[in-house]
Amino acid sequence: MTAGQPRLVEVRLNVLKKNDVLARELRSRFAESGVRVISLVSSPGSGKTAFLEKILSGLRQEFRVAALVGDLATENDAARLARSQVPVKQIVTGTICHLEAEMVRNALEGWDLHALDFLFIENVGNLVCPSSYDLGEELRLVLLSVTEGEDKPLKYPTIFNTADVAVITKTDLAEAVQFDWALAERNVQLARPGMQILKVSAKTGEGMNQATDLFVSLMAGATSKK
Amino acid sequence: MHELSIVLSIIDGVTEEAELRGARGVSAVHLRLGALSGVVKPALLFAYDLACEGTLLQGSQLIVEESPMVVHCPACDADRTIESPQSFRCPFCGAYAANISRGHEIQVVAMELV
Protein backbone atom coordinates (compact mmCIF):
# COMPACT_ATOMS: atom_id res chain seq x y z
CA MET A 1 0.00 0.00 0.00
CA THR A 2 1.28 3.46 -0.87
CA ALA A 3 1.94 5.53 2.21
CA GLY A 4 -0.29 8.57 2.59
CA GLN A 5 -2.95 7.25 0.22
CA PRO A 6 -6.11 6.69 2.24
CA ARG A 7 -8.05 3.55 1.53
CA LEU A 8 -11.80 3.49 1.77
CA VAL A 9 -13.18 0.69 3.89
CA GLU A 10 -16.90 0.03 3.96
CA VAL A 11 -18.34 -0.97 7.32
CA ARG A 12 -21.72 -1.18 9.01
CA LEU A 13 -21.21 0.21 12.47
CA ASN A 14 -24.32 1.07 14.40
CA VAL A 15 -23.24 3.84 16.71
CA LEU A 16 -25.80 3.08 19.39
CA LYS A 17 -25.21 -0.66 19.12
CA LYS A 18 -23.86 -0.89 22.65
CA ASN A 19 -27.03 0.66 24.05
CA ASP A 20 -29.26 -1.39 21.75
CA VAL A 21 -27.55 -4.63 22.77
CA LEU A 22 -27.87 -3.77 26.47
CA ALA A 23 -31.52 -2.79 25.98
CA ARG A 24 -32.23 -6.12 24.28
CA GLU A 25 -30.58 -7.96 27.17
CA LEU A 26 -32.69 -6.00 29.64
CA ARG A 27 -35.85 -6.69 27.66
CA SER A 28 -35.28 -10.45 27.75
CA ARG A 29 -34.37 -10.30 31.44
CA PHE A 30 -37.62 -8.42 32.16
CA ALA A 31 -39.65 -10.94 30.14
CA GLU A 32 -37.99 -13.88 31.83
CA SER A 33 -38.62 -12.38 35.28
CA GLY A 34 -42.24 -11.65 34.44
CA VAL A 35 -41.98 -7.93 35.25
CA ARG A 36 -43.80 -5.42 33.01
CA VAL A 37 -41.64 -2.38 32.40
CA ILE A 38 -43.14 0.98 31.51
CA SER A 39 -41.16 4.16 30.88
CA LEU A 40 -42.29 7.77 30.97
CA VAL A 41 -40.88 10.64 28.94
CA SER A 42 -41.96 14.27 28.75
CA SER A 43 -40.67 17.80 28.97
CA PRO A 44 -39.78 19.08 32.46
CA GLY A 45 -42.88 19.94 34.45
CA SER A 46 -45.44 17.92 32.49
CA GLY A 47 -46.42 15.99 35.58
CA LYS A 48 -44.54 12.69 35.25
CA THR A 49 -43.90 12.43 38.98
CA ALA A 50 -47.43 13.43 40.02
CA PHE A 51 -48.88 10.92 37.55
CA LEU A 52 -46.56 8.19 38.77
CA GLU A 53 -47.26 8.92 42.45
CA LYS A 54 -50.95 8.21 41.84
CA ILE A 55 -50.29 5.16 39.68
CA LEU A 56 -47.88 3.62 42.19
CA SER A 57 -50.27 4.18 45.11
CA GLY A 58 -53.10 2.58 43.14
CA LEU A 59 -51.24 -0.42 41.77
CA ARG A 60 -49.47 -1.33 45.00
CA GLN A 61 -52.78 -2.40 46.55
CA GLU A 62 -52.77 -5.46 44.32
CA PHE A 63 -49.37 -5.69 42.69
CA ARG A 64 -45.68 -5.59 43.53
CA VAL A 65 -44.46 -2.32 42.07
CA ALA A 66 -41.16 -0.40 41.96
CA ALA A 67 -39.78 2.68 40.20
CA LEU A 68 -36.54 4.09 38.86
CA VAL A 69 -36.38 7.82 38.37
CA GLY A 70 -33.82 9.78 36.40
CA ASP A 71 -32.90 13.36 37.18
CA LEU A 72 -29.96 15.62 36.47
CA ALA A 73 -29.25 16.88 39.93
CA THR A 74 -31.67 16.25 42.76
CA GLU A 75 -33.23 13.29 44.52
CA ASN A 76 -36.48 15.17 45.08
CA ASP A 77 -38.51 13.01 42.72
CA ALA A 78 -37.42 9.79 44.42
CA ALA A 79 -38.40 11.29 47.77
CA ARG A 80 -41.85 12.18 46.36
CA LEU A 81 -42.35 8.75 44.84
CA ALA A 82 -41.20 7.02 48.03
CA ARG A 83 -44.32 8.44 49.66
CA SER A 84 -46.24 5.89 47.59
CA GLN A 85 -44.49 3.28 49.78
CA VAL A 86 -42.95 1.28 46.97
CA PRO A 87 -39.21 0.69 46.36
CA VAL A 88 -37.79 3.67 44.48
CA LYS A 89 -34.28 4.33 43.26
CA GLN A 90 -33.02 7.63 41.89
CA ILE A 91 -30.60 7.69 38.99
CA VAL A 92 -28.74 11.00 39.17
CA THR A 93 -27.40 11.48 35.66
CA GLY A 94 -25.18 14.49 36.40
CA THR A 95 -25.02 16.46 33.18
CA ILE A 96 -26.42 13.70 30.99
CA CYS A 97 -29.78 14.67 29.58
CA HIS A 98 -31.32 11.21 29.19
CA LEU A 99 -31.25 7.70 30.63
CA GLU A 100 -29.28 4.97 28.88
CA ALA A 101 -29.75 1.21 29.12
CA GLU A 102 -26.52 0.88 31.08
CA MET A 103 -27.77 3.27 33.80
CA VAL A 104 -30.94 1.21 34.13
CA ARG A 105 -28.95 -2.01 34.36
CA ASN A 106 -26.66 -0.57 37.04
CA ALA A 107 -29.57 0.84 39.04
CA LEU A 108 -31.24 -2.57 39.07
CA GLU A 109 -28.27 -4.29 40.67
CA GLY A 110 -29.37 -5.97 43.87
CA TRP A 111 -33.06 -5.88 42.93
CA ASP A 112 -34.88 -9.17 42.51
CA LEU A 113 -36.92 -8.66 39.36
CA HIS A 114 -38.82 -11.90 39.95
CA ALA A 115 -40.32 -10.25 43.03
CA LEU A 116 -41.89 -7.47 40.91
CA ASP A 117 -45.01 -7.21 38.76
CA PHE A 118 -44.38 -3.68 37.49
CA LEU A 119 -41.33 -1.50 37.13
CA PHE A 120 -41.76 2.13 36.11
CA ILE A 121 -38.87 4.15 34.71
CA GLU A 122 -39.24 7.92 34.78
CA ASN A 123 -36.81 9.43 32.29
CA VAL A 124 -35.13 12.82 32.62
CA GLY A 125 -37.49 15.65 31.63
CA ASN A 126 -36.45 16.14 28.01
CA LEU A 127 -38.28 15.65 24.72
CA VAL A 128 -35.19 15.35 22.53
CA CYS A 129 -32.44 13.02 23.68
CA PRO A 130 -34.40 10.15 25.29
CA SER A 131 -35.81 9.31 21.86
CA SER A 132 -32.48 7.80 20.74
CA TYR A 133 -32.10 5.43 23.69
CA ASP A 134 -33.98 2.17 24.07
CA LEU A 135 -34.18 1.20 27.75
CA GLY A 136 -35.62 -2.27 27.24
CA GLU A 137 -39.09 -1.12 28.29
CA GLU A 138 -42.25 -2.79 27.04
CA LEU A 139 -44.33 0.34 26.88
CA ARG A 140 -43.21 3.95 26.53
CA LEU A 141 -45.56 6.72 27.55
CA VAL A 142 -45.07 10.29 26.41
CA LEU A 143 -46.78 12.88 28.61
CA LEU A 144 -47.93 16.26 27.47
CA SER A 145 -49.70 18.72 29.73
CA VAL A 146 -52.50 20.94 28.48
CA THR A 147 -50.53 24.00 29.57
CA GLU A 148 -47.75 23.20 27.08
CA GLY A 149 -49.97 23.70 24.08
CA GLU A 150 -51.40 21.46 21.38
CA ASP A 151 -48.40 21.58 19.06
CA LYS A 152 -45.91 19.63 21.19
CA PRO A 153 -46.22 16.52 18.97
CA LEU A 154 -45.27 18.61 15.94
CA LYS A 155 -42.37 20.30 17.69
CA TYR A 156 -40.96 17.03 19.01
CA PRO A 157 -42.20 14.42 16.52
CA THR A 158 -39.32 12.01 17.11
CA ILE A 159 -40.10 11.38 20.76
CA PHE A 160 -43.81 11.00 20.01
CA ASN A 161 -42.90 8.57 17.31
CA THR A 162 -40.86 6.35 19.63
CA ALA A 163 -43.61 6.25 22.27
CA ASP A 164 -46.56 3.85 22.38
CA VAL A 165 -49.14 5.87 24.31
CA ALA A 166 -49.68 9.62 24.65
CA VAL A 167 -50.91 10.83 28.04
CA ILE A 168 -52.40 14.30 28.12
CA THR A 169 -52.03 15.54 31.70
CA LYS A 170 -53.47 18.33 33.87
CA THR A 171 -56.87 18.05 32.19
CA ASP A 172 -58.32 20.03 35.12
CA LEU A 173 -56.58 23.08 33.64
CA ALA A 174 -57.75 22.50 30.06
CA GLU A 175 -60.59 24.96 30.21
CA ALA A 176 -58.46 27.71 31.78
CA VAL A 177 -55.95 27.50 28.92
CA GLN A 178 -58.63 26.88 26.27
CA PHE A 179 -56.98 23.66 25.23
CA ASP A 180 -58.07 22.55 21.77
CA TRP A 181 -58.61 18.79 22.17
CA ALA A 182 -59.33 18.04 18.53
CA LEU A 183 -56.19 19.83 17.39
CA ALA A 184 -54.03 18.09 19.99
CA GLU A 185 -55.37 14.68 19.01
CA ARG A 186 -54.84 15.38 15.33
CA ASN A 187 -51.23 16.40 15.99
CA VAL A 188 -50.58 13.22 17.95
CA GLN A 189 -51.98 11.17 15.06
CA LEU A 190 -49.74 13.01 12.58
CA ALA A 191 -46.63 12.23 14.60
CA ARG A 192 -47.65 8.67 15.38
CA PRO A 193 -50.68 7.34 13.48
CA GLY A 194 -52.87 5.05 15.55
CA MET A 195 -51.39 6.13 18.87
CA GLN A 196 -53.57 5.56 21.93
CA ILE A 197 -54.32 8.74 23.90
CA LEU A 198 -55.15 8.91 27.60
CA LYS A 199 -56.48 12.05 29.27
CA VAL A 200 -55.66 12.39 32.93
CA SER A 201 -55.55 14.72 35.89
CA ALA A 202 -53.43 13.46 38.76
CA LYS A 203 -54.98 16.21 40.87
CA THR A 204 -58.67 15.36 40.41
CA GLY A 205 -58.11 11.70 39.54
CA GLU A 206 -59.86 12.06 36.18
CA GLY A 207 -58.78 9.35 33.74
CA MET A 208 -56.39 7.73 36.21
CA ASN A 209 -58.46 4.52 36.27
CA GLN A 210 -58.06 4.12 32.51
CA ALA A 211 -54.29 4.49 32.91
CA THR A 212 -54.23 1.87 35.66
CA ASP A 213 -56.43 -0.43 33.55
CA LEU A 214 -53.98 -0.13 30.67
CA PHE A 215 -51.10 -1.32 32.84
CA VAL A 216 -53.15 -4.11 34.39
CA SER A 217 -54.13 -5.27 30.89
CA LEU A 218 -50.42 -5.80 30.14
CA MET A 219 -50.34 -8.16 33.08
CA ALA A 220 -53.46 -9.96 31.88
CA GLY A 221 -51.89 -10.39 28.45
CA ALA A 222 -48.86 -11.98 30.08
CA THR A 223 -50.90 -14.47 32.06
CA SER A 224 -53.08 -15.51 29.15
CA LYS A 225 -50.00 -16.30 27.06
CA LYS A 226 -48.82 -18.85 29.61
CA MET B 1 -27.82 17.56 23.44
CA HIS B 2 -26.23 14.15 23.57
CA GLU B 3 -24.14 14.58 20.42
CA LEU B 4 -20.89 14.37 22.38
CA SER B 5 -21.73 10.90 23.66
CA ILE B 6 -22.70 9.91 20.10
CA VAL B 7 -19.32 11.18 18.88
CA LEU B 8 -17.49 9.23 21.60
CA SER B 9 -19.28 6.07 20.47
CA ILE B 10 -18.27 6.78 16.86
CA ILE B 11 -14.64 7.20 17.92
CA ASP B 12 -14.68 3.97 19.95
CA GLY B 13 -16.21 1.95 17.13
CA VAL B 14 -14.03 3.38 14.37
CA THR B 15 -10.84 3.04 16.43
CA GLU B 16 -11.59 -0.63 17.01
CA GLU B 17 -12.26 -1.28 13.30
CA ALA B 18 -9.21 0.74 12.19
CA GLU B 19 -6.86 -1.04 14.60
CA LEU B 20 -8.22 -4.38 13.45
CA ARG B 21 -7.12 -3.43 9.94
CA GLY B 22 -3.69 -2.20 11.08
CA ALA B 23 -4.34 1.43 10.17
CA ARG B 24 -2.02 4.15 11.47
CA GLY B 25 -4.69 6.77 11.28
CA VAL B 26 -8.14 7.66 10.03
CA SER B 27 -8.62 10.49 7.55
CA ALA B 28 -12.38 10.44 7.17
CA VAL B 29 -15.49 8.83 8.63
CA HIS B 30 -18.71 8.51 6.62
CA LEU B 31 -21.81 8.56 8.76
CA ARG B 32 -25.41 7.94 7.74
CA LEU B 33 -27.84 9.92 9.87
CA GLY B 34 -31.54 9.16 9.72
CA ALA B 35 -34.06 11.97 9.98
CA LEU B 36 -35.54 10.30 13.07
CA SER B 37 -32.20 9.70 14.78
CA GLY B 38 -32.69 12.59 17.19
CA VAL B 39 -29.19 13.79 16.38
CA VAL B 40 -28.41 17.26 15.09
CA LYS B 41 -25.72 17.47 12.41
CA PRO B 42 -24.12 20.83 13.34
CA ALA B 43 -23.87 19.81 17.00
CA LEU B 44 -22.29 16.53 15.95
CA LEU B 45 -19.69 18.28 13.79
CA PHE B 46 -18.94 20.73 16.57
CA ALA B 47 -18.24 17.96 19.07
CA TYR B 48 -16.33 15.79 16.60
CA ASP B 49 -13.07 17.76 16.13
CA LEU B 50 -12.65 18.28 19.83
CA ALA B 51 -13.34 14.69 20.76
CA CYS B 52 -10.99 13.28 18.10
CA GLU B 53 -7.92 14.99 19.55
CA GLY B 54 -5.36 12.50 20.77
CA THR B 55 -7.07 9.54 19.05
CA LEU B 56 -6.45 7.69 15.78
CA LEU B 57 -9.12 9.95 14.32
CA GLN B 58 -7.31 13.22 15.07
CA GLY B 59 -7.59 15.61 12.13
CA SER B 60 -10.13 13.41 10.32
CA GLN B 61 -13.21 14.64 8.57
CA LEU B 62 -16.72 13.59 9.50
CA ILE B 63 -18.83 13.28 6.36
CA VAL B 64 -22.51 13.12 7.22
CA GLU B 65 -25.04 11.76 4.77
CA GLU B 66 -28.52 12.64 5.96
CA SER B 67 -31.03 9.99 5.03
CA PRO B 68 -34.75 10.58 4.79
CA MET B 69 -37.60 8.82 6.53
CA VAL B 70 -39.17 5.98 4.66
CA VAL B 71 -42.55 4.63 5.73
CA HIS B 72 -44.62 1.76 4.44
CA CYS B 73 -47.97 3.00 3.19
CA PRO B 74 -50.64 0.40 3.94
CA ALA B 75 -52.98 1.76 1.24
CA CYS B 76 -50.43 1.75 -1.60
CA ASP B 77 -48.58 -1.25 -0.13
CA ALA B 78 -45.33 0.50 -0.97
CA ASP B 79 -42.40 2.23 0.74
CA ARG B 80 -42.68 6.01 0.55
CA THR B 81 -40.22 8.73 1.48
CA ILE B 82 -41.78 11.39 3.67
CA GLU B 83 -40.48 14.90 3.97
CA SER B 84 -41.36 15.72 7.54
CA PRO B 85 -41.65 13.78 10.77
CA GLN B 86 -44.57 16.08 11.55
CA SER B 87 -46.78 14.28 9.12
CA PHE B 88 -46.74 10.53 8.83
CA ARG B 89 -48.99 10.49 5.80
CA CYS B 90 -48.36 8.93 2.42
CA PRO B 91 -47.34 11.70 -0.04
CA PHE B 92 -49.25 9.89 -2.81
CA CYS B 93 -52.58 8.90 -1.29
CA GLY B 94 -52.64 10.78 2.02
CA ALA B 95 -53.21 7.69 4.18
CA TYR B 96 -51.68 7.62 7.65
CA ALA B 97 -48.57 5.47 7.51
CA ALA B 98 -47.11 4.47 10.86
CA ASN B 99 -44.68 1.71 9.92
CA ILE B 100 -41.22 3.18 9.63
CA SER B 101 -38.96 1.32 7.22
CA ARG B 102 -35.96 3.61 7.62
CA GLY B 103 -34.99 6.81 9.44
CA HIS B 104 -33.64 5.86 12.87
CA GLU B 105 -30.14 4.97 11.73
CA ILE B 106 -26.93 6.43 13.16
CA GLN B 107 -24.49 4.30 11.26
CA VAL B 108 -20.86 4.52 10.19
CA VAL B 109 -20.94 3.26 6.61
CA ALA B 110 -17.31 3.78 5.62
CA MET B 111 -13.97 5.00 6.87
CA GLU B 112 -10.84 6.20 5.09
CA LEU B 113 -7.73 4.68 6.61
CA VAL B 114 -4.11 5.70 6.24
Image: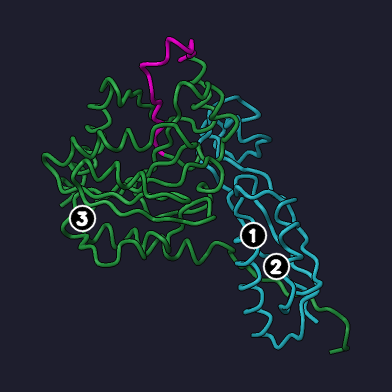
Label 1 chain ID = B
Q: Look at mark 1 in the image and give the residue it sits on.
A: B4
Bin the neighbour count of mark 1 within 10 Å (Cα to Cα): few under 14, some 14-19, many 20 and up.
some
Helix, strand or loop at mark 2: helix
* B19 is within the stretch colored magenta: no
Quarter of the figure that contains the N terminus of chain A? bottom right
Sequence-wise, the earlier of marks 2 and 1 is 1
CB atoms at circles 2 and 3 under 8 Å apart? Answer: no
- A207, A9: nearer the viewer: A207
> Bounds of the magenta span?
A164-181
Q: Position of residue A124 (x, y in %)?
A: 46, 46
CB atoms at circles 2 and 1 under 8 Å apart? Answer: yes
Label 3 chain ID = A
**B14 sits to left or right of B99:** right
Front label number (3 vs 1) = 1
Question: Label 2 vs label 1: CA separation?
Answer: 8 Å
Q: Quadrant of residue A6?
A: bottom right
Give the residue drawn at x 42%, y 47%. A123
Question: Which chain can be seen in cyan?
Answer: B
Label 2 chain ID = B
Q: Look at mark 3 in the image and give the residue it sits on.
A: A34
Same chain under badges 2 and 1? The reply is yes
Q: Position of residue B79 (x, y in %)?
A: 60, 41
